[in-house]
Image (cartoon, rainbow, N blue to C red):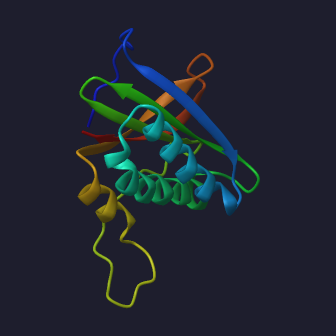
Amino acid sequence: MIKAARQPPWDQSDHFVRTSKPAAARMAREFARECLTACGRTDLIEDAEEVISELATNAMRHGTPEGGYFAVRFERHRQGCVFDVIDRCPTVMPTLRDADDLDEGGRGLLLVEALTASWGYFRRPLKEHRVFVKVVRVAFL
């Protein structure tokens, strides 16, 4: 897991917040593509789009109430690019599992693990530590 750190002055960051609707995963992929194109890392676009789409779908399906919001945050560092996918369900954490051949789902985090340099998750407090959110962080080098 990547440790959160103070953002150095050479880093760039951007945010994308979207209501939990089917088109949101596509829009999150577009956000990832735009961020990586803007910082000259087009080599990462294909993998990042797959990963961000999976994590956005998971945030909508498992971490965001109907009509709620999730967010995608992008940071550009000298050593790579980091995306955070944030939802409001800090009690349900991502779990790698072995899906059966007949299962329609359950392989998404294996894809995330295969396509990223690292990934992890943590709970982050909001508003005076009374409300928490879940953050899934992925890094591409």
Between 92 and 16, the residue placed more toward the observer is 16
Q: Residue at x 30, y 45 (%)?
A: 119
Which x, y percent locates residue 26?
60, 58
Q: Residue at x 35, y 58 (%)?
A: 95
Tell me the quadrant of the picture where the N terminus can be found. top left
Q: How many marks?
A: 0
Q: Vertically, is 103 above or below 11? A: below
Q: Vertically, is 57 above or below 12? A: below
Between 22 and 79, the residue placed more toward the observer is 79
Image side of residue 139 versus residue 62, left or right = left
Image side of residue 109 versus residue 69, left or right = left
In the rendered image, the residue lying farthest to the top is 9
Between 100 and 83, the residue placed more toward the observer is 83
Q: Vertically, is 54 above or below 78? A: below
Image side of residue 108 versus residue 70, left or right = left
In the rendered image, the residue lying farthest to the bottom is 102
Which x, y percent locates residue 6?
37, 12
Residue 96 visible, this orientation: no
Q: Residue at x 68, y 63 (%)?
A: 22
Between 74 and 41, the residue placed more toward the observer is 41
Tell me the quadrant of the picture where the C terminus can be found. top left
Which x, y percent locates residue 50?
42, 59
Which x, y percent locates residue 33?
49, 47
Residue 113: name its quadrant: bottom left
Residue 47 visible, this orientation: yes
